[in-house]
Image (cartoon, coloured by chain):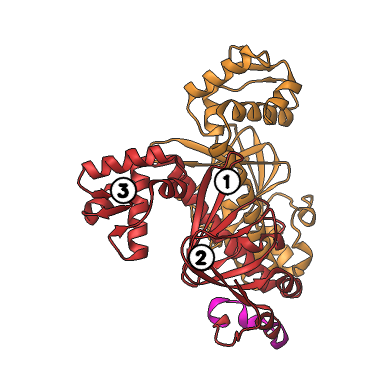
Chain colours: A red, B orange
Amino acid sequence: MKQKGITMTEIDFAGIFPFWDKLSNREKTQIIEASYIENYEKGNLMYRSKDNCKGLMTVQSGQLRTYIVSEEGREVTLFRVHDQDVCVLSASCLMDSIDFDVVIEAVEQTEVIVIPSVDLNHIMKSNPYVELYMYKAASEKFTEVMWTMQKILFQKMDQRIAQFLIDEMKHKNENVLEVTHDEIARYIGSAREVVTKGLKYLAEQGLIELKRGKIVIVDHERLEKYNN
Amino acid sequence: MKQKGITMTEIDFAGIFPFWDKLSNREKTQIIEASYIENYEKGNLMYRSKDNCKGLMTVQSGQLRTYIVSEEGREVTLFRVHDQDVCVLSASCLMDSIDFDVVIEAVEQTEVIVIPSVDLNHIMKSNPYVELYMYKAASEKFTEVMWTMQKILFQKMDQRIAQFLIDEMKHKNENVLEVTHDEIARYIGSAREVVTKGLKYLAEQGLIELKRGKIVIVDHERLEKYNN
């Protein structure tokens, strides 16, 4: 899973990290040499903040999901990360102000570049721009979590399901989605039975069609409007 | 409500803001001269991020509540701020990464020191430590919101009510609380009817007594244990 020592020179660090030009050449070399690539299969657990302190992860391909879990095992998705986006919560141990547990898993086949915490910590201490970057990135996630929270608390369940289907369709660029009711429930923080009921309702309205293990979006425009 | 130009030299800026010793004398003078004190009565609306961009608020006395509101007017409390704590979300316009709407109100008679956004913005641009402070403070609120979210999503309603009563008792240092069921509902993000039912249940267990407009905590120890 871990590919250490592979050539990192092709990675566009300067394009990913706005603090790159504030680093000394020595710091740049340190990051390039310490970074490594990891590959995960769909469903793999990538990170648990209780267990370890991985570092900054940048998604090269695929998609990851950050979620919280109750003691009884109920999951609520906070946000997803894809397309060169940086996942900062996997380095939350470096940020005193961030003190809560999350779990990160691969939603599909996913490749990430990891800058390990131990190396980052070194540079953060000497360079305030790196620390500022980390906290800014955390605040962006704060914003995403607030939107998620408002959806969970204020939106009706059928609207949340409609929203999920539209997001998923846009991301996958397909109108046939291979996703189970249980998976949808975990994404939107609900129970499978509730999702099944909501999907049936959307199907009765002629917005989607339910097939074995598949959901077909038949009226994209109305589904999108449905949500507003 | 606004007291501009009053003597600010008694305020312990260095004690409140860790970035104080990173400021030039000119920047310090600028903040001291721009700052002002505001007083609010219980229930006063202090800030709405949709409407304006106030600045950093430090609570001198009293308590404020930060919450979100649905289109239908349903409120969910995110966190409270008191005792020299700084409220950074009232300056969220200065932080690009923070992009969601909150409302802030005075829970009781409250006095705050305001550093206006326009002056802060000036200093933030020239001094990365001020910007870093803002984002760190925002990340602390991120942590608080995550704890709140986990409570709302995962905790049972009677436990949330018990938790609220204990917090309130500790903060007020009194075991007789003058709070309506409606107010509790708004704090814990629920409906009045649900709170009334929960309170009755706690009263039946002998943990509290319900009187007209008052809740008396009769068994503090069991109420605290109840929550775990």
Task: Please name the residue that numbered disc 2 is placed on.
Answer: A41
Mark 2: few/some/many CA within 10 Å (<14, 14-19, 20+): some
Is residue A168 visible in the rendered structure shown here? yes
Task: Please name the residue that numbered disc 3 is placed on.
Answer: A227
Q: Name the residue: 60% across, 53% down.
A: A102
Q: Is label 3 or label 1 in front?
A: 1
Task: Please name the residue that numbered disc 1 is placed on.
Answer: A69
Please state which amino acid type lies under the numbered disc 3: Asn
Q: Position of residue B93 (x, y in %)?
A: 52, 59
Report the span colored magenta: A14-28
Chain-order first, disc 3 or disc 1: 1
Label ID, residue A210:
none
Q: Quadrant of the N terminus of chain A?
A: bottom right
Q: In the picture shown, does residue B11 fall above or below B164?
A: below
Mark 1, secondary structure of its residue = strand
Subunit that carries the residue with mark 2: A
Q: CA distance from mark 2 to mark 3?
A: 32 Å
Is A18 one of the magenta-colored residues?
A: yes
Q: Do the residues under discs 2 and 1 have CB atoms within 8 angstroms?
A: no
Q: Which of the two residues, A7 or B110, is positioned nearer the viewer here?
A: A7
